[in-house]
Amino acid sequence: MSLGDPEGSALIWAGESNAFVCSTVLPEGKEGVEGVELSGKYFENAVPAVESLVARAGFRLAEWLDLIALGVERDEL
């Protein structure tokens, strides 16, 4: 994570999140969810993935705010 490269940090996070969503929430691609009621097993599989991503985003936001407040840089989360 780098205050000097906010776009780079955001791109890393977006790539990680996208990979996680593709492998966990959309394992069959968009075709697996188009025209299908998203409930039951899909919902049960997706909820933990989404909760994990939201939690991770919260930790990253907290770290980012710490870096701003302290004016320091740390390794990637």
Image (cartoon, grey):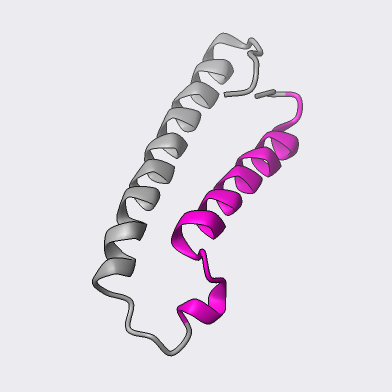
| Front one among 41 and 47 | 41
Q: Position of residue 31 (x, y in %)?
A: 54, 81
Verify whether residue 15 appears in magenta.
Answer: yes
Q: Position of residue 35 (x, y in %)?
A: 43, 90
Magenta: main secondary structure equals helix
Q: Position of residue 76 (x, y in %)?
A: 64, 22
Verify whether residue 63 appears in magenta.
Answer: no
Residue 36 drawn above or below residue 12: below
| Front one among 57 and 15 | 15
Residue 57 drawn above or below residue 68: below
- Residue range in magenta is 4-33
Q: Residue 5 lies in what quarter of the image?
A: top right
Q: Residue at x 27, y 74 (%)?
A: 39
Q: Residue at x 55, y 47 (%)?
A: 17
Q: Is residue 54 left or right of residue 71?
A: left
Q: Position of residue 29 (x, y in %)?
A: 56, 71
Is the C terminus in the top left, top right, bottom left or bottom right quadrant? Answer: top right
| Front one among 41 and 57 | 41
Q: Residue 67 lies in what quarter of the image?
A: top right
